[in-house]
Image (cartoon, rainbow, N blue to C red):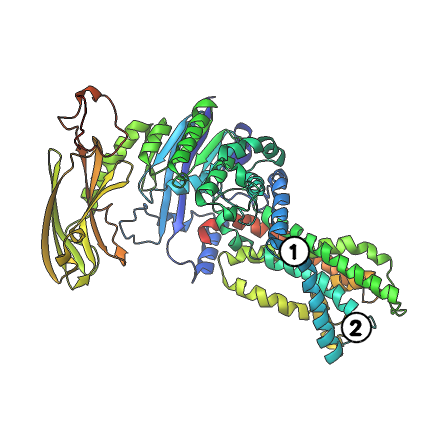
Amino acid sequence: MSNTAIKVENLSKIYRLGEIGTGTISRDMERWFKTKVLKQEDPFLKIGETNDRAYKGSSDIVYSLRDINFEIQQGDAVGIIGRNGAGKSTLLKILSRVTTPSTGRINIKGRVASLLEVGTGFHPELTGRENIYLNGAILGMRKREIDRKLDEIIDFSGVERYIDTPVKRYSSGMYVRLAFAVAAHLESEILIVDEVLAVGDAEFQKKCLGKMGEVSKGEGRTVLFVSHNLASVSQLCITGVFLDNGVVHSVDSIEKIIHDYHWNKIAIKKNVYQLPFFISEKIILNNYKFTKINNEISVEINFKLSEKIPHFRVGFKIFNSAEKDLVRSLLTDFEPRAFVLGPGEFKISSSLDLGFLAEGQYKFALHFSIYGVKDFLIEDHFYENFEITRSLDFNIAYLMESTRADVITHNKWEIENF
Amino acid sequence: MNHNEALKEWDLVIEPQTSLFELNLKDVWRYRDLLWLLVKRDFVSFYKQTILGPLWFFIQPLFTTIIFTFIFGNLAGLSTDGLPQPLFYMAGITAWNYFADCLTKTSTVFRDNANIFGKVYFPRLIMPLSIVVSNLVRFGVQMLLFFVMIGYYLVQNEMSSLFQPNIYILLFPVLVLLMALLGLGLGLIITALTTKYRDLAFLITFGVQLMMYATTVIYPLSAAPEKYKWLIELNPMTGIIEAFRFGFLGQGEFTLHTFGYSVVFTLISLVLGVIIFNKTEKTFVDTV
């Protein structure tokens, strides 16, 4: 027998879209009758479709996961990545037994601790100490286990001074610290972590990432990690699972998977969104052109507004590989004449030298919004991936260094006694 | 490979809904520490930042008794089987409150804990069980008040010959268990159904109130009109409250068949409740 820790076989999960109300009792009865009494195949499984939120499906049943198969070895650190709605959270929910699969099976060896959220069950009126016990017990620890680790947990959290104060008086940072400290001390062979590190200060995030790395590398524990922060995924994980529309696209080393993920995103865009595109009833994107020469990008956007729209904003954003928006450039930011626009057809263009960005992969994405009303969130629809190369006058002695900073400025330094 | 075979090789097998009767009671036992911590949480958070603290446990039954004595005893002049009115009402209210609290709190357990249940696994049955135990603490405190009142009437010697505590007082633990399990069972059924059909949530709040009037809380069974007596006896709480009064105060109609009916009704609703709850907990996150 191999040392497989988690084995997922033909796992599927279906969801029914829309309101659950009218007619559900009769549909429930129909389904129950057909599957249990007549032993037929589940009538609602047949009409399922893949889960792509960009298409409007014809049926209100979707597969969140469809025939997932993969194995995870003991001691591996696995990153699960995919677009929003790819099924990552559903998979984690099933793995942590919050919900059950519709079909298929998962076999697990070892005790599982899952952290879909930090501080689940914290009660604001209770003190930090009382909450450690409560939260620990909710996560599956026995009382004497917590007794034994109490000092260590308090120490890790760094909130000793407030440990007998109700947690409602805590700052959000302290709250997260305490909650993560409890979770980090779970004794389990398998640790499942959702994007829980999005909160808390940078210093503590580093400490958590360190603790998780220790968990997977040091103690031979298996770690499953879901995050949109590709930087921390690549730092922590060895293996990657790429989910796409509810199916496993690929399982490979984490570097390969992150690469796949980037290329897959480009491919999706070309297929799905056709121009002209109705961003809303009143806003139509006719066309746009993105060009990049060396490190300078140029963009031209053609759009049509069918009526006068105050606070309408158009422009672009630049995201880094961890999906953080680094640069924003909107037409209205420095152009008071454009505060109220429309109706009519408009053609705007701009260019920007991105030489200040550190070398690496970036994403250029169009932005349309109405200030204070709506962000149309088309960053996932219309974007271009591009690469910034190191500028030629950059110190060549550092060629092999991978810069952690996103921005490298070219300001002049004065040196006395040169 | 079926579920049990797979379990020999693996520690945990996650599959779609298996048997209805797979209750996983072993898991419930493993998480017993959580149960106590939840009870402690309920108790501590109840009186944090209040001036009177745990005294609030007394205030509610005390005032209800005073109001009932005034309205039903003095204004409406309902019979109390010859017992002092406050004592009669206090007995009914204390017992009824325990059942009603168990029922109403359990009946919203999925909705109230949707957030926790959606984020972490533990045997869901722990939550309603902790509610029943927390309420037991409250009930215990209120029983003290009841005993104090009995003591007061004994000292004052105002008790007529009607006050005859008897051997049936030994049924007290059984009665408490019955009330707890009945409240739990009915509550589990309701909470499981409300995850899909919200209507029941509205029904429960005034349903419990109405049910109190169909129970012998404010009147003795002996005072019920013969025509409707069977209807009141159909209520499983009637048998329990009558037995409670009979044991402690010596008045009430305690018959084996009404009591037996309450026991059977309780067991059926408990089993049904646990099974429905167990089935719902697996997928309720998707429907709530």
Instruction: Identify the residue shown where x is 75% and y is 58%.
Output: B143
Q: CA distance from mark 2 to mark 1?
A: 33 Å
Tag 2, which secondary structure?
loop
Instruction: Identify the residue shown where x is 49% and y is 35%.
Output: A158
Q: Position of B79 compared to A321: left or right? A: right
Q: Residues within 10 Å of mark 1 (few under 14, many from 20)?
A: few
Q: Relative to residue B101, is residue B9 depicted above or below?
A: above
Q: Nearer the viewer, residue B239 or A126?
A: A126
Can I make out residue A205 in this image? yes
Which residue corresponds to mark 2?
B80
Residue B72 occupies quadrant: bottom right
The numbered mark, 2 or 1, whose residue comes first in the sequence reads 1
Tag 1, which secondary structure?
helix
Q: Residues within 10 Å of mark 2 (few under 14, many from 20)?
A: many
Parent chain of label 2 = B
Q: List x then y, in percent, for residue A125.
A: 56, 50
Q: Nearer the viewer, residue B215 or A370?
A: A370
Discs 2 and 1 lie in a common subunit: yes
Q: Position of B15 compared to A141: left or right? A: left
Q: Nearer the viewer, residue A181 or A120?
A: A181
Parent chain of label 1 = B
Asked whether the beta carbons under mark 2 and mark 1 sit within 8 Å of each other, the answer is no
Residue B159 occupies quadrant: bottom right
Q: Relative to residue A279, is residue A5 depicted above or below?
A: above
Q: Relative to residue A390, is residue A334 depicted above or below?
A: below
Q: List x then y, in percent, for residue A295.
A: 13, 34
The amino acid pointed to by label 2 is Thr
The amino acid pointed to by label 1 is Gly
Q: List x then y, in percent, for residue A378.
A: 23, 49
Which of the labelled discs sits on residue B53, or is there none?
1
- Residue lying furthest front: A417
Task: Point out the image quarter for the C terminus of chain A.
Answer: top left
